[in-house]
Image (cartoon, rainbow, N blue to C red):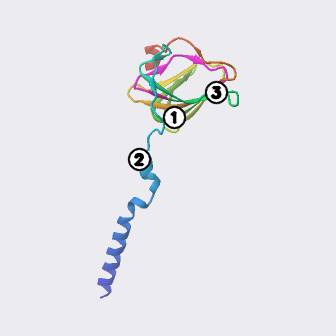
């Protein structure tokens, strides 16, 4: 009888445990299906980008707050030209794999969850890796003026 009770207890515990596996960490399920909560936006058609990228403005700079915030989605291989933000910029990586490089420095790989502080008046570029899309939130200081756009990133420099 003790063996039967022990086996029933084990069976009950195993059933209870297996039924609750999905409830062990409810955030794990959210992480698996989480995606960018912001709209993709409109295709960028100016000459400041190589490849296909999209911009969804989220917050415009105004007299109360001089920062603008935008969601930028890059298809694989897409990137900005070299450019300068007179008041700096912050990049928050939401999805994918991308690159960031300051003039004269090494190219850095960026992944979901990374945050980059682009210093004021430093030429840099950022965008998707060769084989992955890349989504970022760009928080850009506007109190010292608009971005200054420079030359495109060469294919050689991008692939290096």
Describe the element under mark 2 as helix, strand or loop: helix
Residue 58 locus on image (x, y percent): 55, 32
User: Which residue is the site of mark 1?
Assistant: 93
The stretch of residues the image draws in magenta is: 72-87
* Disc number placed over residue 61 in the picture, else none: 3
Q: Residue furthest front?
A: 63
Describe the element under mark 1 as helix, strand or loop: strand
17 or 74, which lies in front?
A: 74
**Distance Cα–Cα, label 3 vs label 1:** 21 Å
Describe the element under mark 3 as helix, strand or loop: loop
Disc 3 residue crowd, few under 14, some 14–19, many 20+, Cα 10 Å: some
Q: Earlier in the sequence, mark 2 or mark 3?
A: 2
**Residue 10 falls in image quadrant:** bottom left
Quadrant in which the N terminus appears: bottom left
Q: Is residue 101 magenta?
A: no
User: Which residue is the site of mark 2?
Assistant: 32
Evaluate whether residue 103 shows in this view: no
Q: Nearer the viewer, mark 2 or mark 3?
A: 3
82 or 158, which lies in front?
A: 82
């Amino acid at each position: 009888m003790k063996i039967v009770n022990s086996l029933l207890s084990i069976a009950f515990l195993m059933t209870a445990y297996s039924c609750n596996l999905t409830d062990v960490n409810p955030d794990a399920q959210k992480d698996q299906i989480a995606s960018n909560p912001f709209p993709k936006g409109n295709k960028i058609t100016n000459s400041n980008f190589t490849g296909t990228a999209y911009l969804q403005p989220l917050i415009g700079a105004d007299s109360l707050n001089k920062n603008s915030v935008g969601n930028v989605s890059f298809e694989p291989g897409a990137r900005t030209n070299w450019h300068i933000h007179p008041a700096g910029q912050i990049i928050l990586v939401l999805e994918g794999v991308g690159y960031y490089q300051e003039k004269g420095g090494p190219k850095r790989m960026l992944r979901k969850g990374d945050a980059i502080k682009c210093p004021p008046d430093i030429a840099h570029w950022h965008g998707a890796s060769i084989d992955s899309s890349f989504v970022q939130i760009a928080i850009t200081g506007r109190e010292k003026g608009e971005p200054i756009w420079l030359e495109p990133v060469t294919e050689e420099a991008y692939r290096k």
